[in-house]
Image (cartoon, grey):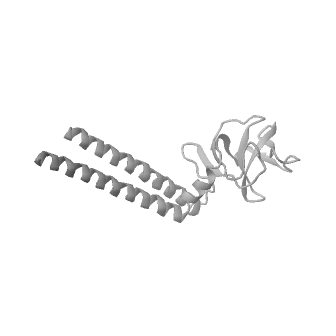
């Protein structure tokens, strides 16, 4: 029983370390890539993520949603893509309405007219593969300095609580043995 309890304690500590350490490493990577290398949407294994800040794709994708994009070798009509618009210096997520060679005509689902410009293939970050409704607000907070601080404090807090619980259980076991 003592060996089982020790394995459980080590397992919980490993999960806490991996979860919170991984989150801190990911946020650190995003921070460095954005602020030191100027990548507005850093990619990890071909995936990028962003919080939606405009309603141009409502009702499919709304303000505050969290999107994950994946680089593709080719894009088709109907795909929802995220691309960088050099003129506005902004990332835009719209649907492809026409493919013409290596350029795409796009339109936001909630917009009346197509975009007034063509999107070159090299400006495309990726195709939207996942939308997490409303989750972008939490992600935006977690990527802020205050959010990073909360994540770090939560990890330390959970680690301390776990140590208190395991210490209490060990104390109870020892007291029972003495009786």
Residue at 16 percent across and 46 percent down: it is 176
In the image shown, does 36 or 107 lie closer to the viewer?
107
Find residue 54 and report its horizontal and vertical position in percent.
75, 54
Residue 75 occupies which quadrant of the picture? Answer: top right
What residue lies at 58% left-to-right and 43% top-to-bottom? 46
Q: Residue furthest front?
A: 179
In this orientation, which residue lies closer to the viewer: 7 or 82? 7
Considering only vertical position in the picture, is 154 above or below 68?
below
Labels in figure, total: 0
Q: Quadrant of residue 109?
A: top right
In-image side of 165 versus 67 (left or right): left
Q: Quadrant of residue 68?
A: top right
- Where does the image place residue 27, in percent across and percent down from the top left? 51, 56
Would residue 127 appear left or right of 96 to someone viewing this image?
Answer: left
Image quadrant holding the N terminus, namely: top left
Q: What's the residue at 57%, 63% (across, down)?
A: 35
- Camera-nearest residue between 43 and 3: 3
């Amino acid at each position: 029983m003592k060996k089982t309890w020790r394995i459980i304690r080590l397992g919980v500590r490993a999960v806490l370390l991996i979860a919170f350490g991984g989150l801190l490493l990911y946020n650190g990577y995003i921070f460095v890539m954005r602020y030191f290398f100027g990548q507005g949407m850093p990619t990890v294994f071909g995936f990028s993520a962003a919080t939606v800040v405009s309603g141009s794709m409502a009702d499919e994708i709304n303000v505050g949603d969290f999107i994950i994009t994946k680089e593709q070798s080719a894009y088709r009509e109907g795909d929802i893509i995220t691309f960088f618009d050099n003129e506005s210096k902004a990332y835009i997520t719209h649907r492809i309405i026409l493919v013409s060679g290596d350029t795409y005509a796009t339109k936001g689902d909630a917009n009346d007219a197509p975009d007034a410009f063509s999107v070159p293939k090299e400006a495309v970050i990726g195709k939207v593969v996942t939308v997490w409704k409303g989750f972008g607000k939490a992600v935006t907070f977690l990527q802020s300095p205050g959010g990073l601080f909360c994540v770090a404090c939560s990890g330390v807090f959970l680690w301390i609580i776990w140590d208190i619980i395991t210490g209490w259980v060990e104390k109870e076991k020892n007291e029972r043995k003495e009786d």
